[in-house]
Image (cartoon, grey):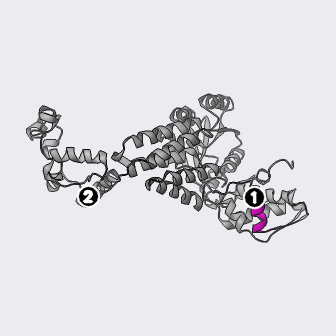
Amino acid sequence: MQNIPLAERMRPRQLSDITGQEHLTGKGSVLERSMHTGHIPSMILWGPPGVGKTTLAQIIAGEAGKTFFSLSAISSGVKEIREVIARAESLNGAVLFIDEIHRFNKSQQDALLGAVEKGLITLIGATTENPSFEVNSALLSRCTVFLLKSLGSDDLLRILNKAILEDHVLRHKKILLKETNALLRLSGGDARKALNTLELVVDAVPEEEVVMTDTLVMDTVQQKMALYDKSGEQHYDIVSAFIKSIRGSDPHAAVYWLARMLEGGEDVAFIARRMLILASEDIGNANPNGLLLAHTTFESVSKIGMPEARIILSQCAIYLSASPKSNSAYMAIDEAISLVKQTGDLPVPLHLRNAPTSLMKELNYGKEYVYSHNYEGNFALQEYMPASLEGKVIYKPGNNSREEEMKSFLQKKWKHKYGA
């Protein structure tokens, strides 16, 4: 029994034992009411690591009296999903928990739809990523999304003190939490990490009395745990430094911050997704190949994972860092959205309107439209903006060789907008 990790030994067994998620698990909460009535919906549990998603799924299955199946999206596919569905059908229903459901591709998620729709399985998916982006809309519409909160210092201390008092191994030692700053900082809102760190430090002290200090924690843990918190402030600080290094055209710093994230166990898809956004926002048409490489990187790392994904991520980070920069597309769409909000629902000019009926043709819909391909250079001068916005300039080409070419092209066509 002592070989079972402390975090597993202290896993809550009932809803009221879960700490820090009272908005979902407290008396009168939505989940508590659902479990009381027996009408448990399929759901997506969205929250940072170590806040109780797996535990909550197990408790729900236990309270519902249903068989509990668990799959990891990292190691399972359509075959495993179908096997579970077949077994659930023979059992007249079951709870299927899928950890990291955001890692399932569309076909894998689609394989769940029929069983969820028919009620053969109660799906509980766990994700650290926004399900609006990572779970396809068909599956998302069949599930209720519950947001789990990051655990605060008081929550973590309550969990640690409970372990010290109640765990059958720890209670044989005299443990004093004299200082807790290092312990809490390394935990980063993750109860599992907090308990594992506590156990690591206690095991490193041979004496029966263990006085937990920041120095003791750091000396014990420094070489054994990556000092990177995937859910807290450091997570956002380091990815911010990574993006700003690429934007600032510094591949050395970009690869350094990339290494910090990889050593900390950051999700490679998260890193690739951020580069995909940057490739359009900060490079754009200055080097359109940046977006293509970033997209290929995102697709590739999602398929192969670590450790090989580090090479692809490094290649992409270096390429984007060394690319010319332009935020003209980003600025153009924001200016256009601002203009729409200011000017409201302006009518589409008659010559640009569609005319599928004879009545519309009688009203001159599309009558004066000039078909560009009938003219030299596939261009005919006409206005495409609403009347009150004629001549309005929104896109301003960036100062780089590729957009200078675009600017030259536009100047020749639209002298009144871009000048000679």
Which picture quadrant has residue 305?
A: top right
Left/right placement of residue 13 relative to residue 378 reads right
The extreme bottom residue here reads 178
Q: Is residue 132 visible?
A: no
Q: Which residues are magenta?
A: 212-221
CB atoms of marks 2 and 1 within 8 Å? no
* Residue ID at (79%, 71%): 178
Q: Earlier in the sequence, mark 2 or mark 1?
A: 1
Q: Name the element at disc 1.
A: helix
Q: Which residue is mark 2?
A: 339
Left/right placement of residue 34 relative to residue 11 reads left
Vertical placement of residue 83 versus 257, above or below: above
Which x, y percent locates residue 415?
Answer: 14, 50
Q: Name the element at disc 2.
A: helix
Q: Residues within 10 Å of mark 2 (few under 14, many from 20)?
A: few
Which x, y percent locates residue 353?
Answer: 17, 41
Please tell me whether the stretch drawn in magenta is mainly helix, strand or loop. helix
Left/right placement of residue 12 relative to residue 72 reads right
Alpha-carbon span between mark 2 and mark 1: 54 Å
Residue 221, disc: 1
Q: Is residue 62 magenta?
A: no
* Residue ID at (25%, 45%): 406
Which x, y percent locates residue 285?
Answer: 33, 46
The foreground one among 110 and 35 is 110
Vertical placement of residue 160 versus 139, above or below: below
Q: Residues within 10 Å of mark 1 (few under 14, many from 20)?
A: many
The foreground one among 380 and 249 is 249
Which picture quadrant has residue 155?
A: bottom right
The kind of residue on which mark 2 rests is: Leu
The kind of residue on which mark 1 rests is: Val
